[in-house]
Image (cartoon, grey):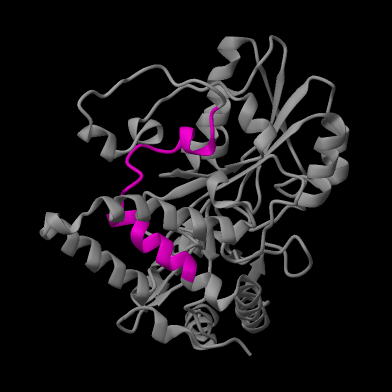
């Protein structure tokens, strides 16, 4: 029986939000942080140097705890695409290198690599039988030229999860850098940087329950040191206190870049990063393992109650490839869009993706929420 965390969110005003794969709800404790951030801006004297420094530092600590990384190895971003472009643009490519991508992956995992063809890099697509590859499928396509493999952890258009351990082990053995987009998984299943991945990135506004325009990146230190340093945000090179000196010396950054060297500009983004840090702290206080169990119970309940004579479940029903994303279709697929509209009219919000219905429950949902969706669907 899942716990009831509804009091920590909302108010939902009688509506059921089952679309966390698009936007996660902001916890009440994070809403309080937004209000405080607005108050700082209303009274600018409240924006002290200490608060400017602490806003990104607090977020780094929370994200580091989430994935088991030192806080100073966290790169702050505004999206998943930001991190992918940093790697694509900074990687030490050689003529004839190959990037392996997954056909029909989410667009953000594909676009950053495509322009590399102008630099002599070959883009190749893996076409797995079930949306994301298993170990045998990846093993069959890796070559000595495969310098980098990029994949999502949970597939946005099918709900299929991949096995990071087995895929990462194959990449390590082949000398292939393994980049993972964890946007549809982080916050609903545990992750630790001891996994054989070279970089993991994600957005903050889905399962991590933060504001839109938030994201982060962790890069294994060995890979970070190999990246071309291609930006220099002034607050990563100096502090605001330096502006009080008689003379401010500005010179080209020297030495190896650090994680901070690659931060998105404007890291004291208190409107977004302050509430997001509190949202992550809240999830960590509850416990990611406990959240995973809660969400699994919600998925089980929905799958057990869906009328199998009317609907097909397209996402995995059980096993390690199942995620918190549920894809269903009416047996008459032409009815799916009208079902999406009918659910919305009943105050139940899901997603309509590739002609299918996608449900994505999270910590703030209850069994009663899933029953509301089941009632609409099963009455058809």
Task: Look at the image and tell me whether residue 243 can be seen.
Answer: yes
* Image x and y of residue 137, in percent: 84, 40
Location of residue 12 (image quadrant) = bottom left
- Relative to 371, does residue 277 appear above or below in the rendering? above
- For image coordinates 24% across by 61% down, the residue present is 37
Task: Look at the image and tell me whether residue 101 can be seen.
Answer: no
**Per the image, is 309 magenta?**
no
Q: Nearer the viewer, residue 10 or 215?
A: 215
Location of residue 54 (image quadrant) = bottom left
**Per the image, is 263 magenta?**
yes
- Relative to 249, does residue 42 appear above or below in the rendering? below
- For image coordinates 34% across by 74% down, the residue present is 345
Q: Nearer the viewer, residue 53 or 299?
A: 53
- The region drawn magenta spans 257-281
- Relative to 253, does residue 260 appear above or below in the rendering? below
- For image coordinates 36% across by 79% down, the residue present is 15
- Relative to 209, does residue 112 appear above or below in the rendering? above
* Image x and y of residue 271, in percent: 28, 56
Location of residue 356 (image quadrant) = bottom right
């Amino acid at each position: 029986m899942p716990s009831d965390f509804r009091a920590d969110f909302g108010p939902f005003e009688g509506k059921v939000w089952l679309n966390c794969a698009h936007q996660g709800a902001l916890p009440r404790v994070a809403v309080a942080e937004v209000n405080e951030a607005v108050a700082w801006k209303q009274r600018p004297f409240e924006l002290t140097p200490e608060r400017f420094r602490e806003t990104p530092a607090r977020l780094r600590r929370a994200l580091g705890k989430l994935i088991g990384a030192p806080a100073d190895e966290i790169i702050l971003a505004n999206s998943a695409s930001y991190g992918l472009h940093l790697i694509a643009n900074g990687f030490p490519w050689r003529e004839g290198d190959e990037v392996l991508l997954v056909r029909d992956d989410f667009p953000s995992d594909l676009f950053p690599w495509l322009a590399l063809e102008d630099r002599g890099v070959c883009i190749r697509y893996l076409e797995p039988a079930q949306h994301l590859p298993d170990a045998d499928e990846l093993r069959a396509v890796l070559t000595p030229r495969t310098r980098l493999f990029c994949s999502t952890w949970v597939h946005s258009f099918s709900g299929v999860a991949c096995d990071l351990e087995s895929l990462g082990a194959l990449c390590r053995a082949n000398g292939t850098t393994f980049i993972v987009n964890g946007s549809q998984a982080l916050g609903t299943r545990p992750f630790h940087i001891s996994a054989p991945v070279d970089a993991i990135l994600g957005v903050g506004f889905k399962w991590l329950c933060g504001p839109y325009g938030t994201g982060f990146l962790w890069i294994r230190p060995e890979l970070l040191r190999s990246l071309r340093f291609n930006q220099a945000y002034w607050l990563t090179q100096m502090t605001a206190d330096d502006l009080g000196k008689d003379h401010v010396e500005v010179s080209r950054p020297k030495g190896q870049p650090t994680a901070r060297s690659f931060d998105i500009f404007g890291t004291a983004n208190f409107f977004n990063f302050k509430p997001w840090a509190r949202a992550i702290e809240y999830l960590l206080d509850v416990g990611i393992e406990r959240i995973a169990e809660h969400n699994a119970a919600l998925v089980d309940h929905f799958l057990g109650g869906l009328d199998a004579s009317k609907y097909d479940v397209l996402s995995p029903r059980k096993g390690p490839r199942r995620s918190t994303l549920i894809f269903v279709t009416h047996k008459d697929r032409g009815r799916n869009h009208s079902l999406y509209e009918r659910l919305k009219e009943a105050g139940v919000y899901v997603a309509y993706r590739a002609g299918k219905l996608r449900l994505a429950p999270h910590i703030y949902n209850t069994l009663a929420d899933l029953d509301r969706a089941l009632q609409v669907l099963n009455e058809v």
